[in-house]
Image (cartoon, rainbow, N blue to C red):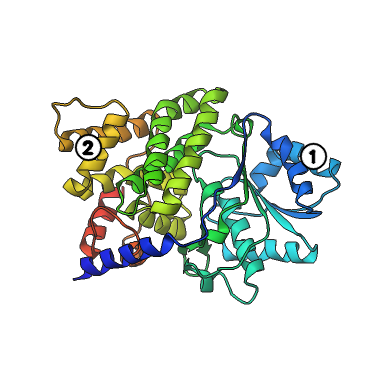
Amino acid sequence: MYKTYCRLYQGAFRVITRFLAWREPQLLEGENSLIKLPALIKNNKIENVLIVTDKGITSLGLMDGLLKGLDAEGISYFIYDKTVPNPTIENIEEALSIYKANNCQGIIAFGGGSPMDCAKGVGARVARPNKSIPQMKGELKILKKIPPLFAIPTTSGTGSEATLAAVVSNSQTHEKYAVNDTVLIPHVAVLDPLLTVKLPPHITSSTGMDALTHAVEAYIGQSNTSETYQYSKDAVKLIFENLYEAYSNGTNSEARRNMQRASYLAGLAFTRAYVGYVHAIAHTLGGFYSFPHGLANAIILPYVLEYYGDSAHKPLAELAELVGLGTPNHTEAQKAAMFIEAIKNLNENMNIPKKVNGIMDNDIPIMVKRALKEANPLYPVPKILFEGDMLNLYEMIRE
């Protein structure tokens, strides 16, 4: 009965989403595309902006060109750079206070997924000043326009520049959850590969596997459209062709550009088709232990895909064929196994561990409940899992 309920819920939600105000960001792409952003902001009659970033970005000087461009256009900017990995409600409220105090008219998110999530949270609070972030948890709790949001990713993984999600951590309860609403999709996204060429190899690998997880979980789910199928396939192919090269040769601008494109396409895919239990588990690891999200996804992905069994064989076999694995003589099960093995090999070649260290016995029951609450009934996964299944998966991934 519960499986039926989940599938009916997913079916109803799939129908509802057809009538939502979906949009894709206006794109600025290619090397040095960042220099075009200040003029675009000026053309939108925006005079004061909040820039949400983190200390790592400011210390590297990655924003220097942007700041000079804003100065040249006469645009005032106010920087919040205290965003932490797995951004907190406190981060959002601190950034919001700067936005309000300086009468900002727009928001620039500069960095990886954390600054983008924080910036989206600020936008949500501006749109709904009488609602707290916990009150906006879940789906479609904002439903009002946010200020113009300009997303500048410096990693190739989260796809946040294309998605409706802001993932937030509650530092008091160690809960990590998403605020999902189409109004949170950025208005403009800047894909400048020069911003990623100095990305350390371990960040390149984990964020790249994050993008792969988005594309694969979207593709094997049951809420796809013809567009999301294609976005996922294009992303998977680009990642298999470019991630290891970007990891091992970080100055290869073509590989960096292709990974940015893959991350964006994967974001377009999962913002419509959703993710699955890999993300649900990864979010609990981030909430409890501040475990890096991309790294968590990379480790968890092959375990969950194997656990799905024959329910995921057909789509995984299709992805295997896409990246050149298997022959017509191989069965779907064999091709699916080859694809999962290819993911494991990619992880191993990039020195990603096979297990998660530090998961505490006492935390697992709570994490299982939270992961199930996030995933069921919303995520249109190949196979509905229950408490016993999730307990098994946590035991499989822990060191």
Inspect the image, locate mark 2, and give the three-letter code of the amino acid beneath it. Answer: Ala
On the image, the x and y values in percent for residue 390 come to 26, 59
Identified at 32% across, 35% down, the residue is 343
Left/right of residue 68 with respect to residue 180 in the rendered view: right
How packed mark 1 is, by other alpha carbons closer than 10 Å (few <14, some 14-19, many 20 or more), is some
Between 204 and 338, which is closer to the camera in this rendering?
338
Residue at position x 55%, y 68% from top? 143
The answer to whether residue 212 is visible is no
Q: Residue furthest bottom?
A: 130
Q: Which mark is residue 336?
A: 2
Q: Depth check: 315 or 334 in front?
A: 315
The residue at 52%/74% (across/down) is: 135
- In the figure, residue 142 lies in which quadrant? bottom right
Q: Is residue 262 above or below residue 364?
A: above
Q: How many C-alpha atoms fall within 10 Å of the one at disc 2: few (<14), some, or many (≥20)? A: many
Counting from the top left corner in percent of width and height, residue 156 is at 52, 38
Helix, strand or loop at label 2? It is helix
Q: Quadrant of residue 153?
A: top right
Q: Which residue is mark 1?
A: 69
Q: Along the polypeptide, which appears first: circle 1 or circle 2?
A: 1
Identify the element where label 1 is drawn. Answer: helix
Q: Which mark is residue 118?
A: none
**Could you say where residue 341 lies in the image, as x and y percent from the top left?**
26, 33
Q: Residue furthest front?
A: 19
Give the Cα separation between the discs numbered 1 and 2.
49 Å
Please tell me which residue is depicted at 57% across the width and 58% down the height of the picture: 184
